[in-house]
Image (cartoon, rainbow, N blue to C red):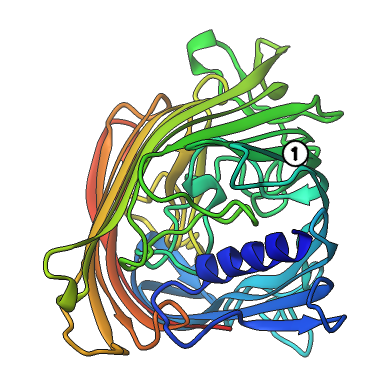
Amino acid sequence: MKKTLLTTALLIAALSFGQGSPDYGGGLKFNINPEGTKYMRFIAWNQIWLRSSQMNPGTMIGEEGITNQEDIGLRRLRLLAYAQISPRYMIVTHIGINNQTFINGGASGSAGTGGYGAGKKPGIFFHDAWNEYAVVLPKESKPFSLSMGAGLHYYMGLSRMTMSSTLNYMTIDAPIFNWALIENSDQFARQIGVFAKGKYNKFEYRFSINKPFATNQAVVNATLPENAVAVDNNNNSKWSKAGYVEYQIFDKESNFLPFKVGSYLGTKKMLNIGVGFYTTPSATKTSVNGISEKHPINLFAGDIFVDMPVGDKKKKMAITAYSVFYDYDFGPNYLRNIGIMNEGVADTGFTGNKALAGAGNLQPMIGTGNIWYTQAGFLLPNKAEKPKVRVQPFAAYTYKNFDALDKASNQFDFGTNLFLDGHHAKITAQYSNRPIYIAKDNIESYKGEFLLQLQIYL
């Protein structure tokens, strides 16, 4: 029985990572004993980005004022390993680097452009590191399963995309606001804590209790309460609580690892509805006339995911769609401006209207308010018996309405995936826009960015 359970778990895990490739199989797995009941598996992936970007007004790179920038960068370089000595025990480690460019992304403490310049020798770090124990093993005769674990983990609740795999997105990347705490009170979307996961019939659940990483951003004093701005300042942080419950109407998904699949490329029939939350007390702070006040972070989300084959089976077509609504409360007028691999700094000599978000490709990304995000794509027909090259055009829409800004924004992404071997070898091209606020109630324009990603994972 134990060997059967282990084989089933390995098969499910392999399928969850191997969407669209008929040749990948079980991946890089090394048996420690002849029976295969003790093993270790490795997963490695690189995502390389080429970009052509319109910069925010008032941007300087390398002491040169610019309006456009072309570059190449290392979005993600990762290695994940997990091992089991029995069906009940598992250890997971995940290391790597992110966001290295020619001018930034180097290790902590590096500066300038010399041998240890700001863009060189990035510091590798742990993304995940946890131990897990299966309390109630999944069995066909029993609808309930339960596993518990502890460590630096990714079971952070809130939404499907908050726990998404970075290997199999339909769009070129996540929209970033799905990781509401990113690099503030978390470590690259993870916190240290205890989690529980499992299934009951068609329901899948994930809950965790965590100790958020400490934050101590300086508070700006306001003279009027309506002008108070909350910043991350939890110091000796209080415990956070997170959870996500999903109802899987058709096929069941694997929960062997936390990473939710972005696109199955028609290899499954999925229709999932989920709700989630994240909450922690005394997480942000404001100051009005010298009197400080602490505020909780309360985040809620609801989402729906569709991925299934359509039409003539011989043509191997499929649709993928995902929609999520976020209700974020970080405290009064909380707002974070974020830009992926942002290389720009403020041009002090610029005399025009500067972007409120700042220089480079910064934009209002996360804040108290609401966000609605929807994406959809279609896997074009292919009659080949063992299709290698597949094409999947897609589009995405984002609506952001933050309390700190008087005007909502509408953003779009358009692109295409060229699958050379499923998600294991693919090229993704995408065009995205972002709003340029020059005042709280004034979006002067939208700037564009063209991205080309080269991805391989094994």
Decide if residue 380 is in sight here: no
Picture coordinates of residue 331, whole percent (x, y): 57, 20
Looking at the image, which is closer to me, 3 or 441? 3
Q: Residue at x 41, y 24 (%)?
A: 403
Looking at the image, which is closer to me, 449 or 255? 255
What is the crowding at mark 1: few (fewer than 14 residues within 10 Å), some, or many (at least 20)?
many
Q: Secondary structure at mark 1?
A: strand
Q: Amino acid at mark 1?
A: Phe
Picture coordinates of residue 404, whole percent (x, y): 43, 27
Q: Give residue 291's quadrant in the image.
A: top right
State the quadrant of the C terminus.
Answer: bottom right
Q: Residue at x 64, y 56 (%)?
A: 256
Q: Residue at x 52, y 36 (%)?
A: 201
In the picture shown, does residue 353 fall above or below 60?
A: above
State the quadrant of the N terminus.
Answer: bottom right
Q: Give residue 271's quadrant in the image.
A: top left
Describe residue 267's horizontal placement relative to residue 164 as left or right.
left
**Which residue position is annotated with label 1?**
195
Describe residue 316's horizontal placement relative to residue 297 as left or right.
left
Looking at the image, which is closer to me, 392 or 437? 392
Describe residue 239's horizontal placement relative to residue 71 as left or right.
right
Q: Residue at x 74, y 88 (%)?
A: 114
Picture coordinates of residue 122, whole percent (x, y): 73, 76
In the picture shown, does residue 89 fall above or below 83?
A: above
In the picture shown, does residue 187 fall above or below 29?
A: above
